[in-house]
Image (cartoon, rainbow, N blue to C red):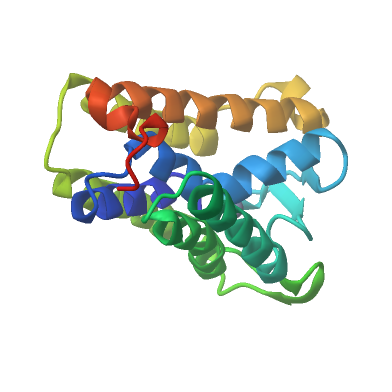
Amino acid sequence: MFIGHYGLSYIVKKERREIPLWLLFTSVQLLDLVAFTLVFFGIENASYAPSENPFFRNQLFLPYSHSLSGAILISAAVFMIFWLNKNKSWAWILSLCVLSHWFIDLVVHTNDLSIFFGSINVGLGLWNYPYVAYATEILFLLIGWLLLKKRNVVSVVLLLLLIGGFSEMLFGKEPEAMKHSASLRSMAVLISNCLFILIAYFSEGKTERNRLFMKTNS
Ligand SMILES: [Zn+2]
């Protein structure tokens, strides 16, 4: 899943207002951020394959970032950082957000998610129905966004960018150079996700967005 993960950030934000939105955005997408960094360095693989179904144009081999075992390790590391180092009582929520990525991906992926570092592949295959998958992502994002207690111009811009960027990625024409270069495509994914996280940072007031850096444990 792509932008649908951010829907979960909004839902968690509604319940736990003390957690900065940009941190929730980073947590739910952390596995993709790790994946495309590893693809950039050639450790994991995402090669281009022409397909009528836009979700299948990326042939993924992500044995570390997108295996259940890898996801558990990454979410445990997030817990350690925020609990032991930052002493945040909501560290467990962040680590569950990280782990949620794998389970939400499980619904859409087709047999390319593994349980243990590349072995025992699973996936429930919603991507076989591209329009249903597309609508599900947007619906999930919208439901979360509508639950937000505070909405402003920046959060509207963010929502439009998320939906616009996702639609363009699926239905727009991909530049030829992108098709042949896994590192270019991974850079594009990384940059767009970092942009979304940055806008999420500015969508909140100064106190809320900087709560991570405060001495309090809430
Ligand atoms: Zn993913």
Residue in the image at 52% along x and 68% along y:
103
Where residue 122 sits: x, y (%)?
Answer: 67, 75
Residue in the image at 54% along x and 53% along y:
84
Q: Is residue 164 above or below residue 19?
A: above
Left or right, residue 83 beside residue 209: right
The furthest residue to the front: 215
Q: Is residue 212 above or below residue 176?
A: below
Where residue 17 sits: x, y (%)?
Answer: 22, 46
Residue in the image at 58% along x and 59% along y:
75
Which of these two is toward me, 90 or 215? 215
Where residue 165 sits: x, y (%)?
Answer: 45, 29
Q: Is residue 79 visible?
A: yes
Q: Is residue 54 visible?
A: no
The furthest residue to the bottom: 120
Residue in the image at 78% along x and 41% along y:
38
Which of these two is toward me, 71 or 122? 71
Q: Quadrant of residue 184?
A: top right
Numbered circles on residues, count: 0
Which of these two is toward me, 155 or 50? 155
The furthest residue to the right: 42
Q: Quadrant of residue 66?
A: bottom right
Left or right, residue 99 beside residue 118: left
Q: Quadrant of residue 178?
A: top right
Left or right, residue 184 beside residue 130: right
Q: Is residue 145 above or below residue 187?
A: below
